[in-house]
Image: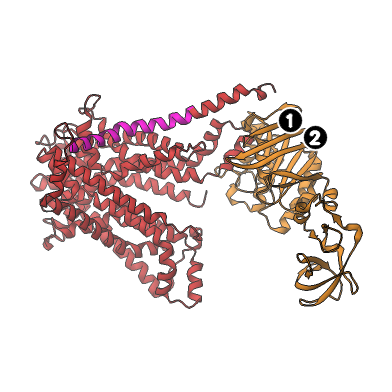
Chain colours: A red, B orange
């Protein structure tokens, strides 16, 4: 019993707890400091002090330039229209998934997710396959048109609305709608006065995310828009890579970051007004099989939309990857190992598959460590009051576009103290920077959902603080960790915006190779791009189906 | 024997426990009774080591436990709900505390099975805890708390989330179990029926202090102050002409020539009696339990008499 009354032991324990927490905070803060804050600061420095002293003229030149204004206006305009279209098309889909049971629902739900996690270059390839020369809709002449960009954005973000809005919708108590009907409200009135207000925070959240993705869209615009359409993102890329106008690119990046911050603030305000008093039900109690003809038609029409809009481009992409001059065959796939040394690719494309997998594995590990430590510091058992700042810091890379990150790496990490320019390690680090916020977002709600009294019970039953972490926190978040790993892996596989800046020609990733192949003339290169896109899509899909399995196994357990 | 002396717990500026002195003897069951927010759960958490005290001591058999972390106190704590580990099956939940004390797996499992039989859940070993009913979950939680043979078992509203019939059945079972195992126990509840049925002594808490400590009979028959009296359902009134007194609802009678005049303002049926709310000339309405064939209706003028032996005068 003497040990029990030792005060020194208590102080040692408290200090160790503080030390552990400090280390948990220090690692992600150091990582973000070197690989995010420093590069972004370098961009700002490059943009505002071009000659060594503070000089706003490049920024002023860019802002007053008529061509730039056109680019900025187009960026906002296409993002707004794309977002509105996405919400309109996907809202009925969210309803169907939330309220009805039908055969194959799980499979369709998983399939709906696929476009969202598809690499942007694959989306671009797929729409080129449909709309370009020799595609089934090639006669419409929509290749390199605004319509192609808008439809591709809807294709890409359909799942965001279905997941976020449908997720809430599935938990809304249908008895509230029943009550409104009994009180004399019609179907449409009930939707407008009961359902829609409850859904508003979810719709606002989904629209904000979709807008952000469309606003910072890069690969899709680069591939489908051609030289005729330019957004802030593609303009930063062109100014840097084609014209080597670094001060202009830096000024554009500053404008871009400012705009994204505004969007995030507006979105944050919209979400802040959250309806707290929603009565939420388990999903099983809110959905049922469609009964009337109208309900069956509703389900049928939405499934048809999904099949044509989401399935169509993917099917055509796959078809064209096999459609060689000499009939259907594996010619384009074989070409991936045969095509050699062009001016922009130094290795056979098949090597890019290996590169992508290795980078994705490394990025996943880094993202799990950084995002995981941050999540535990923010939402774990010994959360510190200061960790709220980390929460914000961790979210910032989400708001700064991948292109900006890549550009920042290019200008900041090529000289001491961080001379990593020649090092392939920059690629997984950039990918991890994009993926770590997602990892933390996945883990934080699960960690927060752990009842503190579970940890208390374990402690009273004899578990030391470290043991509590191992016995309670870790097993409960294990599944979420796997989901986060899947996301990180998929994000890394498809990352294009940052990679295009930092990938050296001798170790390209698969998205970079696809983009390069699309830029080369000839059917063989186009076919090889299709084949490489199919491979990238297949690898990504495997990761996502694994996630969906874990996600579904989760429901109803905790 | 647990001894709590001058215990004080603060949440920032707010004082949750304000100078608690309490002794729980070996084999004794002390019930901590009070409304929500009175500090009763905080007292359990402090004794378990989950809340650091701002002042005071917690001792077991004369040894200071005040700064011993919870996992070395060898106590058991059972919450109202949500405390089973959702990622483990029933037997693993029960054996958790034994595993933490490095009891070999086989012996731990055997002991867990014994305890499951003890709480009436033999054969439930490999069920998922999320599949159990509320009453079954509480039994598993009890077995979990009992498994490492804690020197003090603390229960925080263990029956609070259960329906009435189940609560009454489990109350009897718990009483039996406490006696059979000779458990030393602190039992928190806001329900005085539960406290009186289970405890050797009752501590009534109010605003972080112990308002009264005594046997159930003492507390029920002689509430120490106005707060305790009201909390136990007494009328507190000046209308009897003997200063401020506490009087039970069943000590007031409707009599034609009773000394207190009033008007019935509400009438509720309560299984074995009717409860009348009677507005009297001065002071708040009195609650009166009435039995028999002639129950006054709302709006009737009535006169009330009181049995002087059961009037408790309250210190001003």
Task: Write down the region rendered in magenta.
Answer: A19-48
Q: Secondary structure at mark 2?
A: loop
Q: Is residue A69 visible?
A: yes
| Rendered image quadrant of residue B184 | top right
Q: Is residue B206 left or right of residue B88?
A: right
Residue on which disc 1 sits? B60
Q: Is residue A26 magenta?
A: yes
Residue in the foreground of this view, choosing between B116 and B147: B147
In the rendered structure, find residue B26 and report the number of the disc placed on it: 2
Judge if badges 2 and 1 mark residues of a common chain: yes
Residue B242 lies in the magenta-colored region: no
Residue positioned 30% across, 63% down in the render: A89
> Height in image: A304 above or below A362?
below
Left or right relative to A371: residue A54:
left
Residue at (79% x, 74% y) in the render: B263
Task: Report crowding for label 2: few under 14, some 14 to 19, many 20 or more residues within 10 A (C-alpha).
Answer: some
Real-space Cα separation, disc 2 to disc 1, in angstroms: 10 Å
What chain is tagged by disc 1?
B
List x then y, in percent, for residue B31. 76, 45
The vertical placement of B230 against B158, above or below, is: below
Crowd tier of the residue under label 1, counting other residues whose Cα lies within 10 Å: few below 14, some 14–19, many 20 or above: some
Residue A24 image-quadrant placement:
top left
Image position, residue B59 (x, y; %): 72, 30
Q: Quadrant of residue A516?
A: top left
> Do residues under tags 2 and 1 come within 8 Å of each other at their CB atoms?
no
Q: Nearer the viewer, residue B95 or A6?
A: A6
Q: Earlier in the sequence, mark 2 or mark 1?
A: 2
Secondary structure under the numbered disc 1 in the rendered image: strand
Q: Residue at x 31, y 38 (%)?
A: A433
Residue B137 in percent (x, y) is at 64, 49
Q: Nearer the viewer, residue A27 or A321?
A: A27
Q: Is residue B69 left or right of residue B256?
A: left
């Amino acid at each position: 019993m003497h040990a029990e009354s030792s005060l020194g032991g208590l102080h040692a324990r408290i200090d160790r707890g503080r030390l552990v927490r400090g280390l948990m905070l220090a690692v992600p803060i150091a990582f973000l400091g070197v690989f995010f804050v420093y590069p972004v600061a370098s961009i700002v420095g490059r943009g505002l002090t071009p000659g060594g002293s503070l000089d706003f003229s490049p920024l002023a030149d860019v802002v007053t330039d008529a061509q730039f204004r056109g680019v900025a206006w187009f960026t906002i305009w296409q993002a707004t229209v794309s977002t509105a279209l996405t919400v309109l098309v996907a809202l009925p889909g969210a309803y169907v998934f939330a309220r009805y049971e039908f055969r194959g629902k799980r499979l369709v739900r998983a399939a709906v997710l696929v476009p969202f996690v598809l690499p942007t270059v694959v989306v671009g390839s797929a729409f080129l396959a449909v709309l370009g020369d020799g595609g089934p809709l090639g006669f419409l002449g929509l290749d390199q048109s605004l319509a192609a960009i808008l439809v591709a954005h809807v294709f890409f973000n359909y799942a965001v609305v279905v997941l976020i809005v449908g997720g809430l919708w599935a938990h809304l108590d249908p008895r509230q709608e029943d009550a409104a009907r009994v009180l004399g409200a019609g179907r449409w009135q009930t939707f407008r006065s009961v359902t829609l207000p409850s859904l508003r925070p979810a719709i606002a959240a989904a629209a904000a995310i979709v807008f952000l993705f469309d606003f910072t869209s890069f690969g899709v615009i680069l591939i489908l828009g051609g030289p005729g359409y330019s957004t802030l993102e593609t303009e930063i890329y062109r100014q840097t890579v084609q014209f080597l106008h670094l001060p202009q690119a830096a000024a554009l990046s500053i404008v871009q970051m400012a705009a994204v911050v505004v969007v995030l603030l507006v979105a944050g305000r919209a979400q802040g007004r959250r309806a707290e008093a929603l009565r939420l039900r388990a999903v099983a109690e809110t959905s049922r099989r469609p009964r009337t003809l109208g309900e069956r038609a509703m389900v049928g029409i939405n499934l048809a939309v999904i099949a044509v809009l989401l399935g169509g481009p993917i099917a055509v992409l796959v078809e064209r990857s096999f459609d060689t001059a000499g009939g259907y065959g594996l010619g384009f796939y074989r070409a991936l190992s045969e095509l050699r040394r062009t001016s922009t690719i130094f290795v056979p494309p098949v090597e890019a598959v290996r590169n992508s997998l290795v980078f994705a594995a490394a990025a996943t590990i880094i993202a799990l460590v950084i995002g995981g430590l941050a999540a535990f510091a923010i939402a774990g058992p010994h959360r510190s009051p200061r960790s709220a700042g980390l929460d914000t810091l961790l979210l910032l890379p989400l708001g700064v576009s991948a292109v900006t990150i890549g550009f920042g790496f290019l200008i900041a990490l090529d000289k001491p103290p961080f001379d990593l320019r020649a090092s392939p390690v920059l690629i997984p680090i950039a990918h991890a920077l994009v993926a770590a916020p997602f990892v933390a977002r996945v883990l934080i709600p699960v960690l927060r959902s752990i009842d503190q009294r579970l940890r208390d019970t374990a402690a009273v039953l004899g578990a030391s603080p470290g043991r509590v972490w191992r016995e309670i926190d870790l097993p409960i978040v294990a599944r979420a960790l796997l989901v986060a790993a899947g996301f990180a892996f998929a994000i890394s596989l498809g990352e294009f915006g940052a990679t295009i800046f930092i990938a050296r020609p001798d170790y390209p990733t698969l998205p970079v190779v696809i983009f390069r192949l699309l830029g080369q003339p000839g059917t063989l290169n186009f076919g090889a791009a299709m084949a490489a896109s199919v491979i990238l899509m297949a690898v990504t899909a495997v990761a996502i189906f694994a996630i969906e399995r874990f996600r579904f196994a989760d429901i109803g357990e905790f | 024997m647990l001894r709590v002396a001058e215990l004080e717990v603060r949440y920032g500026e707010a004082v949750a426990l304000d100078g608690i002195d309490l002794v729980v003897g070996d084999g004794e069951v002390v019930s901590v009774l009070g409304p929500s927010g009175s500090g009763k759960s905080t007292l359990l958490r402090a004794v378990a080591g989950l809340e650091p005290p701002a002042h005071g001591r917690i001792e077991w058999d004369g040894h200071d436990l005040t700064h011993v972390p919870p996992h070395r106190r060898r106590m058991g704590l059972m919450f109202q709900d949500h405390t089973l580990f959702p990622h483990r099956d029933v037997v693993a939940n029960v054996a958790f505390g034994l595993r933490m004390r490095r009891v070999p797996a086989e012996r731990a499992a055997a002991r867990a099975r014994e305890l499951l039989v003890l709480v009436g859940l033999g054969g439930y070993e490999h069920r998922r805890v999320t599949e159990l009913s509320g009453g079954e979950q509480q039994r598993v939680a009890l077995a979990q708390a009992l498994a490492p043979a804690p020197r003090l078992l603390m229960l925080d509203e263990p029956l609070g989330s259960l329906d009435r019939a189940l609560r009454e059945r489990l109350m009897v079972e718990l009483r039996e179990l406490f006696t059979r195992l000779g458990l030393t126990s602190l039992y928190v509840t806001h329900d005085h029926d539960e406290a009186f049925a289970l405890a050797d002594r009752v501590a009534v808490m109010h605003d972080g202090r112990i308002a009264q400590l005594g046997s159930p009979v003492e507390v029920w028959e002689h509430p120490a102050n106005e707060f305790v009296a009201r909390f136990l359902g007494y009328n507190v009134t000046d209308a009897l002409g003997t200063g401020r007194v506490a009087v039970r609802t069943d000590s007031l009678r409707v009599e034609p020539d009773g000394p207190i005049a009033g008007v019935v303002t509400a009438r509720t049926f309560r299984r074995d009696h009717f409860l009348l709310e009677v507005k009297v000339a001065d002071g708040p309405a009195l609650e009166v339990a009435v039995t028999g064939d002639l129950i006054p209706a709302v709006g009737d003028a009535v006169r009330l008499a009181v049995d002087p032996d059961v009037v408790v005068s309250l210190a001003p």
